[in-house]
Image (spheres, grey):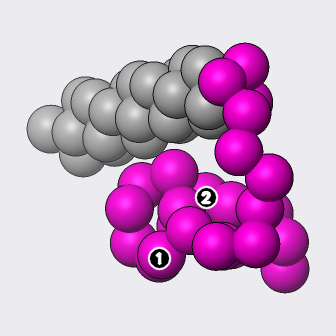
Amino acid sequence: MGVLKQIAEYLYLKKKDPNRPKDKWIGYMHGINRISLLIFILCLVILAIKLLA
């Protein structure tokens, strides 16, 4: 269940945990993960459109 919570936080669907430690490098890592997750979802949508069209 932790993975789904993390994805929801990346996509701004859920508030971040206020008790999480704040670190600059962890913030960069989460930013890169957010970008890669959004690109992955975009590619899935494009593939679905191409398969259905």
Image location (x, y in percent) of residue 31:
52, 28
Which residues, given as a range, are shown in magenta?
Answer: 1-26
Relative to residue 49, is residue 27 drawn left or right? right
Q: Residue 7 carries which label?
A: 2
Q: In which quarter of the image is residue 26?
A: top right
Q: In which quarter of the image is residue 18?
A: bottom right
Image quadrant where one finds the C terminus: top left
N-term mark: 1 or 2? 2
Q: Which amino acid does label 1 sit on?
A: Lys
Q: Which mark is residue 14?
A: 1
Q: Quadrant of residue 41?
A: top left
Query: Separation of disc 1 and disc 2 at Cα?
Result: 9 Å
What residue sits 38% from the left and 62% below the top?
A: 12
User: Is residue 47 visible from the viewing direction of this image?
Assistant: no
Q: Is residue 2 magenta?
A: yes
Q: Which of 41 and 22 is in front in this view?
A: 22
Image quadrant where one finds the N terminus: bottom right
Q: Which of 38 and 20 is in front in this view?
A: 20
Q: Is residue 4 magenta?
A: yes
Image location (x, y in percent) of residue 3:
80, 63
What residue sits 80% from the left and 52% below the top?
A: 21
